[in-house]
Amino acid sequence: MIVATALLWGLAGVCVKSIPWHSVSIMAARCGIGIIMLGLNKRSFRLKGNKKTLLGAVMMSLTGLLYMASIKLTTAATAIVLQYIAPILVFLFSVIVQKVRPKLTEALIVLAVFGGCVLSFADQLDPSRVLGNALGLLSGVTFAGQIIVFSDKSADSNDGMYLSNVLSFIVCLPFMFFDKALDFSPKTIFWGLVLGIFQYGLANICYARGCQKIDKIETSLLLTIEPIFNPIPVWIVTGEKMGPLALAGFVIVIAAVTLYGALPLIEKKRRGKTPAAVTAHDADKEITHER
């Protein structure tokens, strides 16, 4: 289930690149299909509507919109790797705001991710690429905010996901009527359905069910398949390639984030404990991948 989730989420790049619409129009279509898919999977929502859940929904909406806009303006690989700054921002939040004392290994990983993001950002400094890279970084910031908000016990991530789709659909739908690139060719319809049904709807259903069956750390590590897989279908379908600096940054960030996710497991094994013994504090390091 989790491997399927990662592969389905990894289709975001090729879908967005293959649909000629503006990113806001694509977001409206995806969320419209997402509302139906999530509604069919869970027929009843409590929809508490408290401030934390609503704030998380807003963060989730911003993350999706910024990420799609970033894919349009830079390479899909760069967009996803810049978003992967999120777990590092969550780490910094815990250190600065929650006064958690960092370990040397964690601090070194933070520096590695920062360096990888700098390389990815600086790959091609033409105006359009810089804007796309900036939006990718912003999506990482809002993604971190989403993780922090939904870690609060008073927030409901399931309700937040549904509210996020409703909010994004309402806000983005009017832009479709002014989108000059809007067309409904067979190719556009095909990739639009893949994006809404498989990349988003089915992927989140698989995630919701899969993460209940395996350890949280194992889940977060398996989900790193997503950014690794993401550029492959884009390259096959569109021929898009990363520059050498972006490729180096991509490898550094993915390796560092994977190591960061594995640290609790490594520490427990050193102490002679099993993965099941991971504490709630360690589990907070999981990357929450609700798109």
Image (cartoon, helix red, strand yellow):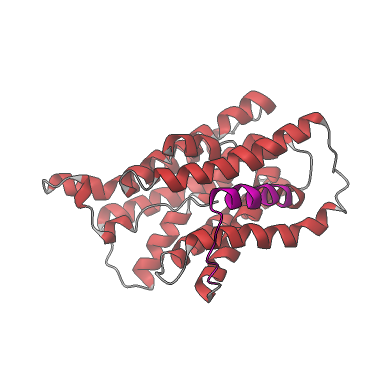
Name the residue at the front extreme. 43
Residue at (14% x, 46% y) in the render: 270
Of residues 203 and 68, which is closer to you in this image? 203
Q: Which x, y percent locates residue 164?
A: 61, 60
Of residues 254 and 190, which is closer to you in this image? 190
Q: What stretch is highlighted in magenta?
A: 28-48
Residue at (56% x, 41% y) in the render: 202
> Does any portion of residue 248 appear in the rendered image?
no
Name the residue at the bottom extreme. 51
Please tell me whether residue 211 is drawn above or below residue 164 in the rendered image.
above
Q: Which x, y percent locates residue 166?
A: 66, 60
Of residues 192 and 272, which is closer to you in this image? 192
> Does any portion of residue 202 appear in the rendered image?
yes
Taking the image as shown, residue 243 lies to the left or right of residue 220, namely: right
Name the residue at the left extreme. 272
Q: Which x, y percent locates residue 107?
A: 32, 56
